Amino acid sequence: MHHEVRIQTIVTYYGSKLGERKTKKDAREMQLIWEQYFEARLKQEIRQRQELEAEQQRMVAQLEAERQAQAQRLTDITEFLQELGQHFQAESWHRSRSQETPDLWTRQIESSFVAPKEATPTKGLWLSPVDLATTRGHTTLVFFYPSGAAFFDAARLKEAMAKALVAFYPLAGRLGFHNDGRLEISCNGEGVLFVVARSCLVAQDFDFSKPSLELRRVFVPRIEPPSLIMAIQVTFFKCGGVALGVAGHHAAVDGISMFDFMKTWSAFSRDGDGAAIELPCHDRTLLRARSPPVVHPDALSVLHPKVTLSQSSSRPNATEVFPISRDQLVTLKRLCGGASTFCSVSALVWKCAGIARRLPPDTIARLSFPVNVRRRGVLKPPLPARYFGNALVSLCVAGAARDIASEALASVAARINGALARMDDDLVRSAIDYLELADKDIRPQRGSLPETELRIVSWLSLPGHDADFGCGAPQVMSRAESVRGGFVHIMNDAPENHRGGSAVRVLVCMEATNMKEFQRQLYANIAKQASKL
């Protein structure tokens, strides 16, 4: 009986502990004895203990991993909140500064209109199709002079401006309409708005090289009335620096004409009546359309068509300035087969913008740019060098996005140069006729270009740093504000910065989400290609 109980015990053990069904017959055949039973049971308990320890170690490791992940999430949240706090603090600071600018940060101490010193023609000045096709609204600029306080005497500045306006009298007029409804300049001598302000800040509180809403609000006067053609504000800092903010309506002047006036005004302020000036030409009928207008079919391939601007706010824009050093510029021009600075830099920017925007390969990417028709050999007879007004015709080049992204920089630059090479009298006259036939919408334009479009404006040849009021050239000359996505400005840096520093500045306004990749592509392309030379 005892033997049967032992066998039954072994059968129960193996049936429950080992998970296998054993019969009495199996037990007898195995000839199990008590020692074997206890040995099997001990091994099973050891295995169970090992499995339990392994499970405990796994759970400990999992808990440790979760603890570390939770700690990392806490760190990320803390950093995010810190950045968010800094962002809101900066936004609050900028908002308070912009809102309190008139009373706290800057204080207007004088506001007046400066009229020509002598009698000037009183008439309606006809505007050409090129004038009417330009961007509507005022172009805003800012000049910074680090030690100009001693040279910017308000009385002397107004006296010099009154003298300069005798030759540049359309700037003292107002925009109006002719009897036929066409926009014109009413040359009535009412004057340029001139504002003097003082700031309790120092110049180092501002980045004058980077356009911003803050620069526009603080240093450029409000345009009142809207028909005003030009407004200027002189702001004195407590550090001795001076900021000169300028707003000029683009329907009246292009960049070259604007800077011609600035050069003449500063010369009168610096040299008095002994200033050497060059008189402007106000005959805008030199760019009148033919009768009847005739657009040559071949011209349509390079003339820039009208583009509908996007009003979407889902992808906000950002503005950044990218300096290109003298050595980088030399390398870039060599990579582009000796192309001009404009063609070389434009090719690089167009290529990098398409890659950063991740345009679909088959999409047609288009680059447009204004060309100065005052250049010799373009018109017959040529325009006077001091033609005052808008003398810019927009050209464009286009290609599949994959081609622009994959081609060598020299090939992309050749595309741009090919369009420039087609500039002649026939093309310009066709462009003027084309603009005369187009709808003349004078309402201010708002929005951004589509991502397939890029517009590059060259200020490389503009005499922006010639505005010397007696304290030397401005340390910085730049746009005060740039808010239209898809626009790029290429400009020379200050002459003193050319020695070992930046030679060219590329001012880019594009989608904020694409800006970092654009910057990476811009400098990586120069470095990569330079290593192959």
Image (cartoon, rainbow, N blue to C red):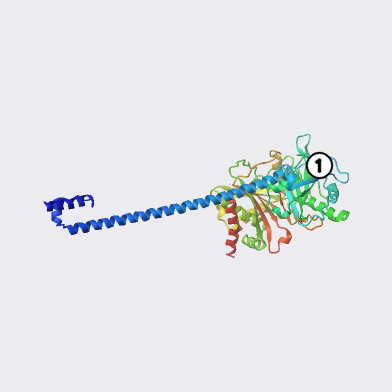
Whether residue 281 appears in this view of the structure is yes
Q: Is residue 413 toward the left or the right of residue 241 in the image?
A: left
From the top left corner, tell me how far across and down residue 499 is, in percent.
Answer: 71, 64
Locate the C terminus and report the quarter of the image it occupies.
bottom right
Q: Is residue 113 above or below residue 27?
A: above
Q: Is residue 467 toward the left or the right of residue 332 in the image?
A: right
Q: How many marks?
A: 1
From the top left corner, tell me how far across and down residue 93 is, in percent.
Answer: 66, 47
Task: Tell me where residue 102 sits by quadrant.
Answer: top right
**Residue labelled with disc 1:** 173
Nearest the viewer among 440 and 494 is: 494
Task: Check disc 1: other Cα within 10 Å, few if <14, some if 14-19, many if 20+.
Answer: many
Q: Outermost residue, front direction? A: 2
Whether residue 430 appears in this view of the structure is no
From the top left corner, tell me how far across and down residue 214 is, in percent.
Answer: 69, 47
Q: Outermost residue, left direction? A: 1
Nearest the viewer among 296 and 495 is: 495
Task: Tell me where residue 149 sits by quadrant.
Answer: bottom right
Nearest the viewer among 288 and 331 is: 331
From the top left corner, tell me how far across and down residue 458 is, in percent.
Answer: 69, 52
Q: Is residue 405 above or below residue 435?
A: below
**Residue flagged by tag 1: what amino acid is it?**
Gly
Please tell me whether mark 1 sits on a helix, a strand or a loop.
loop
Nearest the viewer among 163 and 129 is: 163
